[in-house]
Image (cartoon, rainbow, N blue to C red):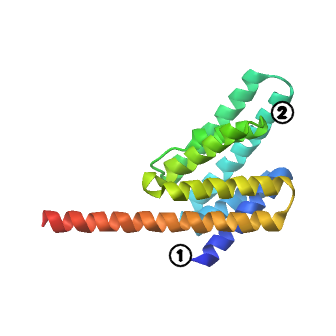
């Protein structure tokens, strides 16, 4: 596993949180696009995904403003528009499993300060992404993302980066593990069928 890649991705992820706070959405889109380029996606896929993620963040912010204004219908409308942007990211990148609804819901519950719901949707987001075979990984990823959020709220950028690097290290390990399982399965099928 490339520790340098995990460090780069973790630093970019931490940067995205600060860019969101500063409402620097163009730079946020660029940072997100860089993550996807580092993961091997084409420049067009990465830029499209980065822009969609930036738009999703903006829609979630609009939802928070609607919440503060007491307009529940408008708030939900904005969150579902954010989910649609995240679904477009998944389509752009060719993801097989959709986790956009859980991403949107934990964003919403975070702003509503409903900790159990945040935890549930963070876990479901990761569990659906890595699968049952990586249940422990899903739990670790959920924990790391919770820690990122907790520390980010206290404006500790170095610890946020540290936790984001741990998050990416674990995620990259699980993807490599899934590839090894797939290769073993294919070899088994070839041996059995031949």
Viewer-nearest residue: 24 or 131? 131
The residue that disc 2 covers is 65
What's the residue at 43%, 56% (across, down)?
133
Left/right of residue 44 with respect to residue 26 in the rendered view: left
| Percent position of residue 111, x then y | 78, 38
Viewer-nearest residue: 177 or 48? 177
Q: Quadrant of residue 121?
A: top right
What's the residue at 79%, 39% (across, down)?
61
Measured in 3D between alpha carbons, the distance from the residue under mark 2 to the one under mark 1, in whole angstroms, is 41 Å
Q: Quadrant of the C terminus?
A: bottom left
Q: Which mark is residue 159?
A: none
Provide the secondary structure element on which disc 1 rests.
loop
| Percent position of residue 52, x then y | 65, 47
Q: How many marks?
A: 2
Left/right of residue 48 with respect to residue 107 in the rendered view: left
Viewer-nearest residue: 31 or 71? 71
Would you say residue 106 is visible in this rendering? Answer: yes
Left/right of residue 144 with respect to residue 89 in the rendered view: right
Provide the secondary structure element on which disc 2 rests.
helix
The residue that disc 1 covers is 1
**Is the Cβ of the residue at disc 2 closer than 8 Å to that at disc 1?**
no
């Amino acid at each position: 596993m490339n520790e340098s890649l995990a460090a780069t991705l973790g630093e970019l992820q931490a940067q995205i949180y600060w860019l969101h706070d500063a409402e620097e959405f163009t730079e946020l889109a660029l940072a997100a696009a860089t993550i996807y380029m580092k993961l091997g996606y084409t420049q067009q896929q990465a830029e499209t995904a980065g822009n969609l993620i930036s738009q999703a963040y903006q829609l979630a912010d609009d939802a928070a403003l609607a919440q503060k204004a007491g307009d529940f219908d408008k708030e939900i409308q904005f969150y579902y528009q954010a989910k649609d942007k995240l679904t477009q990211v998944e389509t752009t990148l060719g993801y097989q499993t959709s986790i956009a609804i859980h991403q949107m819901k934990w964003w919403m519950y975070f702003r509503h300060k409903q900790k159990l719901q945040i935890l549930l949707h963070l876990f479901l987001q990761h569990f659906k992404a890595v699968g049952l075979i990586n249940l422990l990984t899903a739990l670790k990823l959920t924990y790391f993302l919770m820690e990122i959020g907790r520390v980010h709220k206290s404006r500790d950028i170095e610890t946020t980066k540290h936790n984001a690097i741990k998050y990416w290290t674990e995620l990259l390990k699980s993807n490599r593990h899934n590839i090894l399982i797939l290769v073993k399965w294919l070899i088994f099928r070839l041996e059995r069928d031949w």
